[in-house]
Amino acid sequence: MKKFDHFKSNLNVLALADQEDLTNEFIIGGIIDKFFIQFELGWKVLKELLSYEGQGISASGSPKMILKTAFTIYDFIDENVWLEMLRARNDMTHIYDALAARRLVDAVLQRYIPEFQKMKEGIESFYKDEIDNM
């Protein structure tokens, strides 16, 4: 699945964020941008997986509905963390505040990257024999 390949590739880069200069505003902005991309790839991967599973919501579901449905099927999805990511993405898209940006980066490093990694591992385990054929 091409989207899952992109998800994994972007995650490999995002996972290096803690090694960067977190006092640099450009680095902070770059981490936030990578997080936005990772989140988009994440919910779209889930949308494709729900389609594969025959879930009708995948045809027209919003990110929130996709996440809520995925939570009912997959035990590797933490609904609260994903909905928190959705809110963070929506809030930061329209407002730039240095303190809010720093809080978001802290959340990305502490909660969101581990959640993305948990999703990656969960998908690879759940679909181990099928993922390359999707």
Image (tube, grey):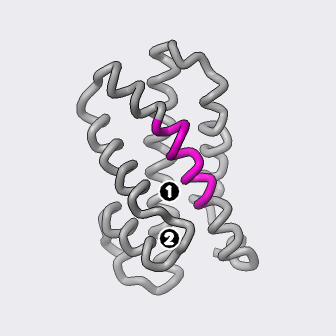
Camera-side residue of 71 and 6: 71
Q: Is mark 1 on a helix, strand or loop?
A: helix
Type of the residue with mark 2: Glu
Q: In the rendered view, does 44 fall on the left or right side of 13?
A: left
Q: What element carries label 2?
A: helix
Q: In the rendered view, does 45 fall on the left or right side of 67?
A: right
Circle 1 crowding by C-alpha within 10 Å: few under 14, some 14–19, many from 20: many
Type of the residue with mark 1: Gly
Between circles 1 and 2, the one closer to the viewer is 1
Q: Which residue is drawn at 59% across and 49% down?
A: 114
Position of the N terminus by quadrant: bottom right
The disc, 1 or 2, on the residue closer to the chain's N-terminal end is 1
Q: Is residue 101 above or below residue 74?
A: above
Q: Which residue is drawn at 29% across and 24% down?
A: 96
Find the distance from the CA under tag 1 to the CA under tag 2: 10 Å
Position of the C terminus by quadrant: bottom right
Per the image, the residue denoted by label 1 is 42
Q: Name the dominant secondary structure of the magenta segment.
A: helix
Q: Give the magenta part as a residue range.
A: 107-119
Per the image, the residue denoted by label 2 is 48
Furthest-left residue in this view = 94
Furthest-top residue in this view = 24
Furthest-bottom residue in this view = 54
Q: Which residue is drawn at 56% across and 45% down?
A: 113
Whether residue 114 appears in magenta in the rendering, the answer is yes
Camera-side residue of 69 and 79: 79
Circle 2 crowding by C-alpha within 10 Å: few under 14, some 14–19, many from 20: some
Camera-side residue of 120 and 1: 120
Q: Residue at x 67, y 62 (%)?
A: 121
- Image location (x, y in percent) of residue 48: 50, 70
Camera-side residue of 48 and 68: 68
Q: Is residue 108 above or below residue 3?
A: above
